[in-house]
Amino acid sequence: MKTQVGIIGAGPAGLMLSHLLHLEGIESVILENRSREEIEGTIRAGVLEQGTVDLLNATGVGERMMREGHIHHGIELQYNGIRHRVNMYELTEGKSVMVYPQHEVIKDLVAERLGAGGKIYFSVSDVSLHDIETDSPKIRFKHDGGEEELVCDFIAGCDGFHGPSRKMIPNRTENQKIYPFGWLGILAKTPIANPELIYSNHERGFALISQRTPEIQRHYIQVDPNDDIANWSDDRIWTELKERVETDGWTLPDGPIIQKNIVSMRSFVCEPMQHGRLFIAGDAAHIVPPTGAKGLNLAMSDVQVLSKGIEMFFKSGSDDLLESYSEIALRRIWKAQRFSWWMTTMLHRDFSHTSFERGIQISELDYVTSSRAALTSLSENYVGLPLEWERAKALQV
Ligand code: RFL
Ligand code: PHB
């Protein structure tokens, strides 16, 4: 089997890359080790930056999102039991975010790719990469019991944090920070609690009130990352959530919990994100703690740069932009890392902190919520920073 770009992973990065390449007349094949049902049913992100929304719309896959998603002009920050609204729309001159679940984005992209004749192999196994330092790298894999080989011009490793691609980059530096925090996330059958998301810093730990549909909501509480979900009855979860977000005169609606799990939190950046004819994108290259709602959005910005580089190669024969892929993508990635680390540090309760450090944390929230300059900085990061195209412009792309 032959194709121009062999893509490993049908997450947001792999699917969007395949879609963008198709729009430029470049052929790709996606290899995914889970089934279509599994990738379309996994609950993850909820918040899309303005740039991600614009990208989905500009490339013809935003129609259902515009119908079923919810545009949010702000968020609320809570500490010491008081809410403070951040009017992002006003502070960023009209930008906003969209609450639309990741698995719905996945469904829209899979439907679009398959509808346009795109090739996605689901439930493959034993994926391995070969000859990435040559002009015809190969991916070997098993599908339907048979051994297959995909010969490509380029390989895009969009296979998430645990995939095989990153490990193929020799001499890479892995920069990492592990947090002493976990997030217990729930999906619950309740009405929408609040028009906007609430990020709450509380003595007992962080809590986040989010939403999905008018009937189903998504909320999170900070827990020990090594805690076992079996220790958390529905009653205990609701009691803890209410304790951390309710204010005088505002109560949190509860209801049956239909899904619950605990995830640990890390910041991670792999440098560089390329070697020979292999390029990695999204969670394969970096992980952010979810407090800044950046992971899916970074996956989308990586593949915009990568697809432009591949397009330039096939249209003009120049690999100038591809050679700069890591450098261009990493500038935005590090800024999103900084923001996600900052939001995480400001909002979570670190039980090893002294009263001095706790005092500084509350004072930071006090400063942020009372300074227009600080609120503007938070807002422009939350709605999404621009792509780093200066280097590309210098290359006259
Ligand atoms: P994905 O989504 O992990 O997709 C990788 C795909 O590769 C497949 N794969 C393989 N395929 C073939 N062979 C192999 N050997 C393979 N190994 C893996 C996997 O099955 C999978 O389908 O990576 P991608 O595309 O880079 O997308 C990244 C995002 O999924 C991730 O960053 C976000 O979910 C992070 N995230 C959030 N991001 C946001 O932008 N906004 C949010 O509000 C937000 N909230 C969150 C989040 C992540 C969370 N969790 C569960 C960690 C909230 C949570 C709780
Ligand atoms: C979500 O709705 O899943 C969500 C919202 C905001 C975040 C993280 C996750 O910062």
Image: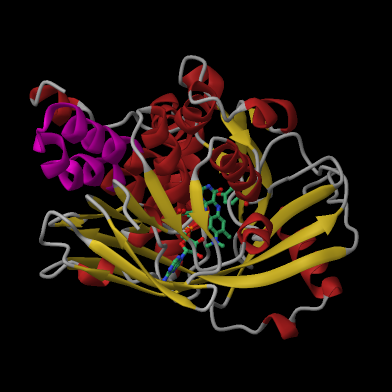
Residue 55 in sight in this render: yes
Q: Main secondary structure of the magenta part?
A: helix
Left or right: where 113 falls relative to 352: right
Residue 246 in sight in this render: no
Residue under the point 65% across and 55% down: 40
Residue under the point 42% across and 42% down: 18
Q: Residue furthest right?
A: 255
Q: Quadrant of residue 263?
A: bottom right
Left or right: where 125 falls relative to 73: left
Residue under the point 77% across and 48% down: 247
Residue under the point 75% across and 79% down: 232
Residue 311, given in percent of the width and then of the height, sits at 25, 32
Residue 229, given in percent of the width and then of the height, sits at 69, 80
Relative to 395, residue 120 above or below: below
Residue 143, given in percent of the width and then of the height, sits at 49, 71
Q: Is residue 164 magenta?
A: no
Relative to 234, residue 38 above or below: above
Left or right: where 55 falls relative to 182: left
Region in magenta: 304-333
Residue 336, given in percent of the width and then of the height, sits at 35, 45
- Image quadrant occupied by the C terminus: top left
- Image quadrant occupied by the N terminus: bottom left
Q: Quadrant of residue 301?
A: top left
**What kind of colouring is applied to the model shown?**
secondary structure
Q: Does the magenta stretch include residue 327?
A: yes
